[in-house]
Image: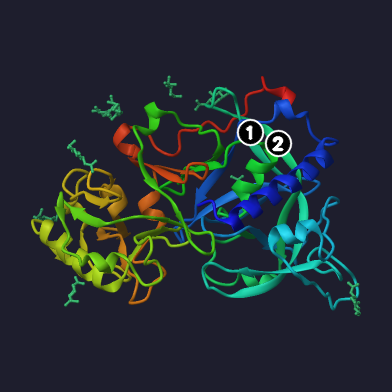
């Protein structure tokens, strides 16, 4: 992990943080009252099945809904429409902030009146829509970002804390085309990058570089993303299964999945099929929050679907509903009869179990389908784990030790991702 480049970036980051910290003394409480952790409420969009986090930005403060992109490098949002903020600032071309974002070219704005996202002599970065892969040139920007803290007891949200100079990109509204949840104004990148949302916050507030996703399974209840401290304890999550995180070339998160079991029986797969040419050196699965369902490379998908059907032959199949290929009458499924799916990781004792609530989805009233899709012949990874399989699981990314902690379904511990109490308690006033 400790490549020279990584060390360079890390050292550089540390230095630029010192600058940021001294700038922000004016607007923030002293260092000793920094929060141990932060928490973002998460919502599920019922139309797309994708997950959204609201962050508080700008002056005066405004709640901004952003699509969660686990593998995105940074935060980008639409600044074309009504971006009003007295604290907006676009750093000058070739400044320290621009190199932090990796923006080496200068922006030019063809409009006569400058506005957020459109200035001359600022810096430009390429932003990518994770749903369509469309790209746009965007202005690197700074503005305030506020997130709820977690109280020292970890069970409630505390007051909002503010990072005055949060770095993000201001993108044209055209980049928000595609199957986005309604009202979403941009994308929150959680990737392995010095300016991603969790790493920028951890660097600034000085808590460990770790975060945990707890995505809600219903649009009626919210889930949570914990940054730094977790808001759920071991009693609530059960023991986690740990596996190494491997970072991809664009800061994406991969885990080694060596085989798949259904009903405790191995799915017959060629070992080589789980290591694609793109991920040959580490193999396995990429984790994604911009894919609603886990996608399997075509040969794996075919073998897996057939094997699952054989293991579940007691229940008759119904006409499948696209994009799924294996569907059942919902009345025939119960919480106990759907076979468990295990992803076997670095060795055969380390498994992540996917139970019925995560392996099956009701595609239409009365019709439930195996919630896995055909990823085609040349996907980004042999397995791309999607949002439905992560819901109501506690998924901890520890970037300090480079390991991923996975609970299985919290529902089997009689809890869920919707138990965290977002009502702020007032006894931590000093942090305001
Ligand atoms: C998220 O932000 C949007 C836009 O400001 C707002 O309409 C919505 O109510 C917010 N959701 C929550 C739960 O705060
Ligand atoms: C940027 O500079 C160009 C000339 O190079 C000018 O036409 C344009 O109005 C300027 N834009 C702003 C926002 O100042
Ligand atoms: C874990 O959290 C639950 C719910 O907040 C609480 O009842 C329990 O005492 C906590 N357990 C530990 C070991 O902290
Ligand atoms: C967690 O692991 C400990 C030690 O191995 C064990 O005693 C405990 O029963 C486990 N808890 C659960 C919920 O599996
Ligand atoms: C495994 O590899 C053999 C030979 O390359 C091929 O014929 C077979 O279809 C493969 N099976 C699967 C499940 O990919
Ligand atoms: C499946 O459900 C249908 C309708 O409720 C019922 O008629 C049928 O017997 C069930 N089949 C099985 C295998 O449970
Ligand atoms: C797996 O677990 C078994 C039984 O607990 C143990 O004997 C074996 O050494 C373990 N294998 C590995 C690779 O940890
Ligand atoms: C969960 O709740 C059900 C019903 O309330 C109960 O039967 C079961 O024992 C509980 N399971 C656990 C692990 O607490
Ligand atoms: C959430 O916390 C607040 C403040 O401590 C408390 O008044 C409220 O009852 C809690 N809500 C739940 C559902 O536990």
- Above or below, 357 relative to 294: above
Give me the disc on residue 149. Answer: 1
- Looking at the rendered structure, the number of numbered marks drawn on it comes to 2
Mark 1: which secondary structure? strand
Q: Residue at x 34, y 60 (%)?
A: 284
Query: What scheme was used to colour the molecule?
Result: rainbow
Q: Is residue 178 toward the left or the right of residue 219 in the image?
A: right
Q: Label 2, secondary structure: give it.
A: strand
Viewer-side residue, 193 vs 160: 193
- Looking at the image, can residue 195 be seen? no
Residue indicated by mark 2: 161
Using the image as rendered, state which of residue 184 and residue 271 is in the foreground.
271
Q: Residue furthest left?
A: 314
Report which quarter residue 140 is drawn in.
Answer: bottom right
Q: Crowding near pointer 1: few (<14 within 10 Å), some, many (20+)?
A: many
Q: Residue at x 77, y 51 (%)?
A: 143
**Number of other residues with Cα within 10 Å of mark 2, as a class: few under 14, some 14 to 19, many 20 or more:** many
Q: Is residue 73 visible?
A: yes
Instruction: Give the x, y percent position of residue 424.
Output: 62, 29
Name the quarter where the C terminus is drawn: top right
User: Label 2 to label 1, Cα distance in Å?
Assistant: 6 Å
Q: Earlier in the sequence, mark 2 or mark 1?
A: 1
- Relative to 230, is 164 on the left or the right? right
């Amino acid at each position: 992990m400790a490549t020279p480049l990584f060390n360079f970036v890390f050292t550089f980051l540390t230095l630029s943080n010192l600058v940021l910290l001294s700038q922000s003394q004016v607007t923030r409480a002293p260092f000793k009252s920094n929060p141990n952790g932060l928490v973002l409420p998460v919502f599920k969009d019922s139309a797309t099945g994708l997950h959204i986090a609201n962050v508080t930005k700008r002056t005066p403060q405004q709640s901004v809904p952003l699509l969660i992109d686990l593998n995105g490098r940074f935060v980008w949002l639409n600044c074309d429409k009504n971006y009003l903020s007295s604290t907006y600032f676009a750093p000058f071309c070739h400044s320290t902030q621009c190199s932090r974002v990796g923006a080496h070219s200068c922006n030019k704005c063809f409009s006569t009146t400058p506005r957020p996202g459109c200035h001359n002599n600022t810096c430009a970065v390429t932003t990518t829509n994770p749903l369509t892969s469309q790209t746009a040139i965007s202005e690197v920007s700074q503005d305030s970002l506020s997130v709820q803290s977690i109280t020292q007891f970890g069970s409630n949200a505390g007051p909002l804390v503010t990072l005055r100079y949060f770095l993000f990109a201001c993108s044209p509204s055209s980049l928000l085309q595609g199957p986005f949840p309604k009202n979403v104004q941009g994308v929150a990148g959680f990737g392995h990058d010095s300016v991603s949302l969790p790493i920028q916050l951890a660097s600034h507030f000085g808590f460990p570089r770790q975060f945990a996703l707890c995505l809600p399974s219903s649009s009626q209840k919210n889930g949570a993303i914990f940054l730094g401290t977790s808001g759920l304890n071991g009693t609530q999550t059960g023991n986690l299964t740990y596996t190494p995180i491997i970072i991809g070339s664009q800061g994406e998160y991969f885990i080694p999945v060596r085989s798949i079991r259904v009903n405790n029986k191995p799915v017959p797969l060629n070992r080589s099929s789980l290591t694609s040419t793109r991920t040959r050196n580490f193999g396995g699965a990429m984790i994604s929050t911009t894919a609603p369902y886990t996608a399997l490379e075509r040969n794996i998908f075919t073998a897996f679907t057939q094997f699952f059907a054989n293991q579940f032959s007691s229940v008759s199949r119904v006409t499948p509903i696209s994009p799924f290929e294996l569907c059942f009458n919902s009345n025939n499924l119960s919480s106990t009869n759907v076979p468990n799916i295990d992803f076997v990781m670095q060795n055969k004792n380390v498994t992540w179990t996917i139970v019925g609530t995560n392996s099956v989805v009701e595609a239409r009233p009365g019709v439930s389908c195996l919630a896995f899709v055909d990823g085609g012949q040349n996907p980004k990874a042999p397995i791309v784990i999607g949002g439905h399989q992560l819901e109501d699981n506690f998924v901890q990314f520890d970037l300090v030790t480079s390991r991923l902690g996975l609970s299985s379904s919290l529902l089997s511990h009689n809890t869920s991702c919707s138990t965290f109490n977002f009502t702020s308690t007032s006894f931590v006033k000093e942090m305001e």
